[in-house]
Amino acid sequence: MQALVLSDVGHFDLVTLDDPVPGPGEVRIAVTESGICGSELGGFLGTDGLRKPGLVFGHEFVGVVDAYGPDVPMEQHLPLGASVTANPLRSCGVCPICVAGHENVCPQRKLLGGHIHGSNAGLIVVPAKAVHRVDHLPDPSSSVFAEPTACALRAVGRTRISAGGSALVIGAGPIGLLLLEVLRFRGVEQLFFTERVEGRVAAAEASGATRLSDDPEALVRQIKELTRGLGADAVFDAVGSADTRTSATLAARPGGDVCFVGLHSADGMLPLRDLIRREVACTTSFAYRPDEFGQAVELLGRGELVFRGEVVRAGLADGQHWYEQLIKGHPAGKVVLQPSNPGT
Ligand SMILES: [Zn+2]
Ligand SMILES: [Zn+2]
């Protein structure tokens, strides 16, 4: 099979690898589309501490069932050629963290395209139990966005935001756009966002959100003016820089919620005395549980949630170009690589 392999920091090569053989309980999927995730850009640059040269990236994908390994239970057997996606995050399922329902942070978890070869390739092997059939859904191709949508569903669920409330999303990249969609779907009435890249603004506005300044002082002033002097019920930081983390805390109302999602900077300082005196609840959100991934597939496939960003489709051979473009700040909401498309 053809695969896009990180041969060195900042460099992919399109190479031919042996076709992977599905083991016991596993399914092989012929990948039709594989989305580039913002979390992979640091890996491409060698700064994420996870992805190493020799790896095939990619964890957001759709494809068709191609082959089965032995011992796949009958109820997990789909017809060959069925359209599917799969939860790319493998947790052990038996440790105390998994048993407590925190599979997303299982200490033994492995991410496709992070710890093990991912979907920027013609074929990928996954456990049969991770597979979700999508061809019964009105829009099966939407499940290429299931993984970031699952992240957004979890993040919103980590806060107390409810219908009729107000929310601010800092950063309208793919995760920010999907946070706005989930908040709209949940009936949040006043939706606000900030975004520096002009080319991403229209997609966020399409979810019914109003753009505010990304200057920290102006942002806090504006959000208070729009919320009777209080601040937003919930603020989501989908960037994760020192500035945006501080802005997120200052834009929340007394007794409100802040959810840190963006991973840009490793460390940061927060105005903790102010947070305590206003009793702002700070939480974090990482990835998703298996049930949240399943919900994302269904809600996207039925059109209840829509990925409204610009989608660029390209061949695997153009992967190097598109990772570079995204690092330079290209406004595309999502770049989707197509392993069967020869590219340029
Ligand atoms: Zn992702
Ligand atoms: Zn576990």
Image (cartoon, rainbow, N blue to C red):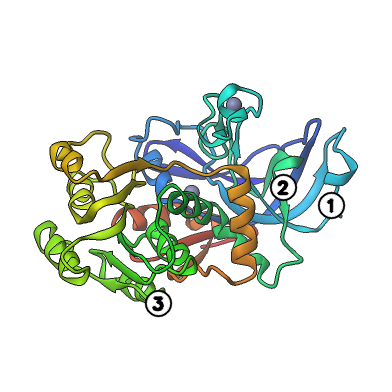
Identity of the amino acid at label 1?
Answer: Leu
Question: Disc 2 vs disc 3: which is toward the camera?
Answer: 3
Tell me, yes or no, whether the two marked residues, 2 and 1, touch with CB atoms within 8 Å. Answer: yes
Tell me, yes or no, whether the two marked residues, 2 and 3, touch with CB atoms within 8 Å. Answer: no
**Residue at the image position 66 percent from the left and 24 percent from the top:** 94
Report the front residue among 214 and 251. Answer: 251
Few, some or many residues within 10 Å of mark 2 (<14, 14–19, 20+): many
In this rendering, would 28 be left or right of 35? right
- Give the spatial CA distance, label 3 vs label 1: 37 Å
Give the label on residue 206, or none.
Answer: 3
Task: Identify the secondary structure beneath mark 3.
Answer: loop
Q: Count how many numbered circles sit on residues in the image.
A: 3
Q: Quadrant of residue 118?
A: top right
State whether label 3 is within 8 Å of ligand 1: no
**Residue at the image position 66 percent from the left and 71 percent from the top:** 139
Question: Disc 3 vs disc 1: which is toward the camera?
Answer: 3
In this rendering, would 316 be left or right of 243? right
Residue lying furthest right: 74
- What residue is pinned by disc 2? 131
State whether label 2 is within 8 Å of ligand 1: no
* Relative height, residue 99 to residue 278 (above, below): above
**Residue at the image position 25 percent from the left and 64 percent from the top:** 194
